[in-house]
Image (cartoon, rainbow, N blue to C red):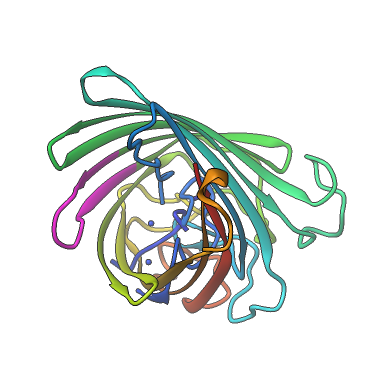
Amino acid sequence: MKHNYRRNLMTTQLLALALAAGSAVAGEPVTTAPVTPAPAEDVISGVLKLDFNSHFISYGNDVWLDGSSMSDPTFNPMLEIAIELPAGFTASLGTWWDVNSKNGGDSSPLGGRIQEVDVWAGLAYTVGDFTTKVTYQNWMYSGGTEDILDIAFSYDTFLSPSITVHNRLDTGGVAGSGGQAGDEGTVVVGGLSYGFDAGPFSISIPFNIAYFATDEFHAPGADDGLGYGSLGVAASIPISFIGSEYGEWTLNGNLTYYITDSDVIPNNPQSDFLTAGVGIGIAF
């Protein structure tokens, strides 16, 4: 999903109140690669998210050219299923959608207001606190498809360091209102996140910085180098009146501030901007 996760650095994000990611991120849910729910007691588990986001950010690119505006949010449902396998492996399947009327009304190539549908399959391997994951993604939008291979490494310790190597294998259609398509290439995203509880709230403060290893990733003529950095703050609170037999429900909210380099990501209407999101999450 173009992944938040998509689209994080001058350094998957420099200032924001982010709960799951302060903006819609294609492929990158919030955002930058899809987040796999960790199987606990059940062999099969899942996460459903129903989010409204002020922006759709794909690896630092403001897809719908919203800039400083937060008046026309997108609806971004996401579903991911995780299957616990023997010997520390976990398989995942998921989908993320972008639903809005920003591209000239209610008639998109996918039908109605459905502007993009992303699907992915992943395989993760965990040893102790270290996890590595490979995810193949297919993003469908604007009458084309974009193929993605993400390789992610994370360590479950203080500040939760992570590195995601995002590889665009094949370009799709021309998304958003920019009128230009990028090329195949690689973006390396480094991330840190600090989490804590404040009463009933779970708070996280994610920071991301992205390096574009190839030029012309988002648009013809774009440079390689540091493309964006982001800092966010996210909060969630349990919806306690819904019984646990229906899953674990949470109300989520986030803010994320992006700083982007106009030479690396030239189509954004503003190089620095704030995004916001709110939604409901269901873990089962």
Corner quadrant of residue 211: bottom left
Identify which residue is drawn at 68% across, 62% down.
Answer: 74
Total marks shown come to: 0
When the figure is inspected, residue 162 is found, relative to residue 24, above or below; the finding is above
Q: Is residue 264 left or right of residue 268?
A: left
When the figure is inspected, residue 102 is found, relative to residue 90, above or below; the finding is below
Q: Is residue 80 visible?
A: yes
Magenta stretch: includes residue 156: yes
Identify which residue is drawn at 52% across, 74% down.
Answer: 275
Residue placed furthest toward the bottom: 68
Identify which residue is drawn at 72% across, 43% down.
Answer: 142
Q: Residue 166's x, y, as percent?
A: 37, 43
Asked whether 44 or 4 is in front, the reply is 44
Q: Is residue 181 left or right of residue 165?
A: right
Start-end of magenta stretch: 152-165
Q: Is residue 196 left or right of residue 233?
A: left
Corner quadrant of residue 157: bottom left
Asked whether 257 or 220 is in front, the reply is 257
Q: Is residue 1 visible?
A: no
Q: Residue 189's x, y, as percent?
A: 30, 53
Magenta stretch: includes residue 208: no
Identify which residue is drawn at 39% across, 40% down.
Answer: 36
Q: Residue 145's x, y, as percent?
A: 62, 34
